[in-house]
Amino acid sequence: NVMAHNFPLDLASVEVPSING
């Protein structure tokens, strides 16, 4: 999910999210 780097709790994609985005 593209939003994963914006939302640390992005349940739509299991990757390595960060609030830095």
Image: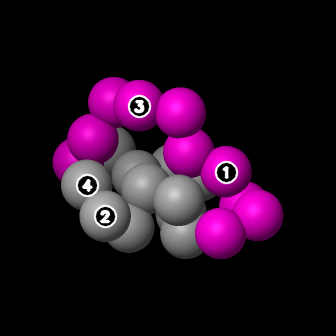
| 11 lies left or right of 16 | left
- Secondary structure type for disc 2: helix
Which amino acid does the dot numbered 3 rest on? Glu
Task: Name the disc covering residue 15, or none.
Answer: 3
Specify start and end residues of the magenta stretch as a single range: 12-21
The amino acid pointed to by label 4 is Asn
* Above or below 16: residue 1: below
Between the residue at mark 3 and the residue at mark 4, the CA separation in whole angstroms equals 9 Å
Question: What residue did someone put label 2 on?
Answer: 2
Q: How is the image coloured?
A: one colour
Residue 12 image offset from top left, x and y in percent: 23, 48
Q: Residue at x 65, y 69 (%)?
A: 21
Residue at the spot of label 4: 1
Q: Earlier in the sequence, mark 4 or mark 1?
A: 4
- Determine which residue is flagged by label 1: 18
Q: Are marks 4 and 2 in contact (CB under 8 Å)?
A: yes
Q: How far apart are the alpha carbons under marks 4 and 2?
A: 4 Å
- Amino acid type, callout 2: Val
Residue 20 horizontal side relative to residue 4, left or right: right
User: Which dot marks residue 6?
Assistant: none
Within 10 Å of the Cα at label 1, are there few (<14), some (14-19), or many (20+) other Cα atoms? few
Left or right of residue 14: residue 20: right
